[in-house]
Amino acid sequence: MSTKEKSENNPKLVADWNTLIRTFIKPENGTTEISLNKYMEQILFGLHDFLKKHVGITEEMSVRELSERYSDTTIKKNPQKKLADVIKDIILDIAPHAVNVSSPYFIGHMTSAIPFFMVNLKTIVSALNQNVVKMETSKVVSIIEKQVIAKLHRLIYQRDASFYQQHVQNPETTLGCFVEDGTIANITALWVARNALFSKRKDFEGVEKEGIHAAYETHNINKCVILVSRYGHYSLKKAGGVLGLGNKNVISIDVDENHRLDTNSLYQTIKELNRFEKKTKILAVIGIAGATETGKVDPLGKIAEICHENKIHFHVDAAWGGPVLMSDRYQHLLKGINLADSVTIDGHKQFYMPMSCGMVYFKNPTITNAISYQANYVLRPGSVDLGRKSLSGSREANSLILDSALKIMGTRGYALLIEHGIDTAKKFAREIESRCHFQLIIPPELNILTYRICPDGIKRKLAQAAPEKQIQINRKLNEINRKVQRIQRERGNSFVSRTLLRLNHTEDEKIVVFRSVLMNPLTNIAILKEILDEQEKIYLNHFT
Ligand SMILES: *Cc1c(COP(=O)(O)O)cnc(C)c1O
C-alpha cells in the first residue's frame, strides 16, 4: 500500500462481517442513529439552505475544476467513511455545486421545486424496496399500481364506471404502465403501435418475433414513417432508431402560425403518401400536448379525426401537459386527448414527483398484448406480473408516490399549481411586451414561453428589411442573446434556458431565444421582473 493510500484510509474502518450485518438490520449504532436522523432532517428540510446561494451552473467553481476533483477511478479496498460522514460530505461538498432547481429564480427547465412530502414518499419507496416487475416481490403494490393507472386513465379517457370496474384489477388487460420517464413512455407507445401494425398473420409471426425486415416483406413495403410537428421531442427520434424504423423516418409536419401542427399539411402528407408511396406505411401520428420548447398544444381533436379516417395509431405526447387535465379552467386546451390510442405523461414534470417517473396510457385495454412476454420463473400468464407487458424489467413502486400525492393534493391542489403557472406565464408575456428591449417570440398557451432581446429600433428595421438583411440582423441578435444568457447563468442569480427556433418568416434561419418554464409556485411576477431587469442590464452594459 502506498503511503498516499494509507493516509486516505481511515484506520478504524475495516469491512468486517459483524458490522456489515448490522447495516442490514439497523443503521450502525445508537449515536450514529442520532446523527443520521439529524442529517436526514437536514436533507428533508434544509438542503435548500446549502443550495440557496446560487442557481444554475455558476462559474464559482468551473465544471473543469470539478472534473479534476472527481477523477480518481480506484475503488478502495477498505471502507473510507461512515454513512453519517458520507451524508455530511454530500450536504457540504456536493450539494453546493449541484443546481438549485428549487429556486424561484430557476425558470429555465422542466425540472423545478417539489413539495417536501415527495422526499418522504420517495424514502418510503426505497425502504419498502418493492419490485413491481412481479407479484411475488410487490403483492398489494402491484394492485395499487393498477388502481392509480385506472384513475389517470379515467382522467384522460373519461370512460364510464362499468368500464373501470371491468378493467381496474383485470390481470388480462392493461390501461397503462409506469416507466422510467417520458422517453421510455414514448418508445413504449410506439413499440405497441409497431407491433399492433405488424401483428401475426398467415405465414408471419409478428414483428416482435420476426424482425422489421420480415415485417416489411410480408406487408410488401420498404419504409414505415411516424408523423409529428417540427416541435416533436427528440425521444421520438430515439424511438424511430430503437424500433428499427430509422429515425430519418420520423417526419416533421409543418406548423401553423400558432406553432401547432398544421392539420392541412398533415392531411396532405397522408394523402400523398397513400397515393404515391405504396411502399410506405404510416406507423403513427403524434400530437403534442405541451411542446417542450413552446408549450403549445396541437389540435388533438382534428388530428384524431384524420387518424381515425386513415386507421393510423394516434399517440399524444402529453409528457408535459397531461396534468393540465386536472384544471377546470384549462382542461379544454387538451380537448380531444381522449381520442388518442396512447398517451405519454411524465410524473416528474407537472405531477411534481421526484426524478424520475413516466407513464403511458392506452385507450384499448388489450393493445399491450402486442408486447407481452413470459418467463417461466417470473412472468406467469394470467398473473398481475406487471413486467409482462413493459419495456423495463425491475422497477420501483413509483405508483405509491403518485397515489399518495393525489391524496395529499387532490386534483384541486394540482389545479392551483397548474393555473398559477399558466397565469404567471401570461403576466410575464405582458411584461415582456411592455419593455422596449424585449420581443415576445411565442406567447404562452400553457406555462412555457420564449422571448429574446430585440430593441424596438431593431424590431422596426426587421419588419422592413429584405430577407437577406433580416438574416444578418437575426445573426447579430443571436450573438447578443447567446451572450446575455451565458452571462446571466454564470452570475448565478437566476437561470433562463436558451434554445434555437426556426420561425416561418425566417425559414431556414434559426433564432436564439430565451425559454422559460413557469412551474415553481414561488415564482411570481416580481421575480420575473427582476430577471428581465438583469438581462436588460447585461445587454446595456455589453452591447450599447
Ligand atoms: C420532457 C418531454 C419528453 C421526454 O421526457 P423525459 O422524461 O425527459 O424522458 C417527451 N416529450 C415531451 C413533450 C416532453 O416535454
Image (cartoon, rainbow, N blue to C red):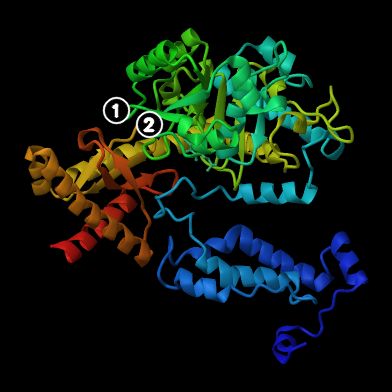
Check whether the beta carbons of the residues at disc 1 and disc 2 lie within 8 A of each other.
yes
Q: Residue 437's spot in the image, x, y percent?
A: 17, 51
Please indicate whether residue 256 sits to the left or right of residue 233 in the image.
Answer: left
Label 2 near ligand 1 (CB < 8 Å): no
Tag 2 residue: 296
Q: CA distance from mark 1 to mark 2?
A: 8 Å
From the viewer's side, name the closer residue of 218 and 91: 218
- Number of residues whose C-alpha sits closer than 10 Å to that of mark 2, classed few (under 14), some (14–19) or many (20 or more): many
Residue 152 visible in the picture: no
Asked if residue 486 is positioned above or below residue 13 in the image, the reply reads above
Q: Residue 540's spot in the image, x, y percent?
A: 17, 61
- Number of residues whose C-alpha sits closer than 10 Å to that of mark 1, classed few (under 14), some (14–19) or many (20 or more): few
Label 1 near ligand 1 (CB < 8 Å): no
Asked if residue 87 is positioned above or below residue 469 in the image, the reply reads below
Determine whether the residue tagged by mark 2 lies in a helix, strand or loop. loop
Q: Quadrant of residue 216?
A: top right
Determine whether the residue tagged by mark 1 lies in a helix, strand or loop. loop
Q: Quadrant of residue 494?
A: bottom left
* Residue at the image point whose x is 23% and y is 45% from the top: 432
Name the amino acid, label 2.
Lys
Q: Residue 366's spot in the image, x, y percent?
A: 70, 17
> Closer to the N terminus: mark 1 or mark 2?
1
* Residue at the image point whose x is 8% and y is 44% from the top: 461
Tag 1 residue: 258
Q: Quadrant of the N terminus?
A: bottom right
From the viewer's side, name the closer residue of 427 and 471: 471
Q: Residue furthest right?
A: 18
Please indicate whether residue 341 sits to the left or right of residue 370 in the image.
Answer: left
Please indicate whether residue 348 sits to the left or right of residue 444 in the image.
Answer: right
Q: Quadrant of the C terminus?
A: bottom left
Please indicate whether residue 447 sits to the left or right of residue 205 in the image.
Answer: left
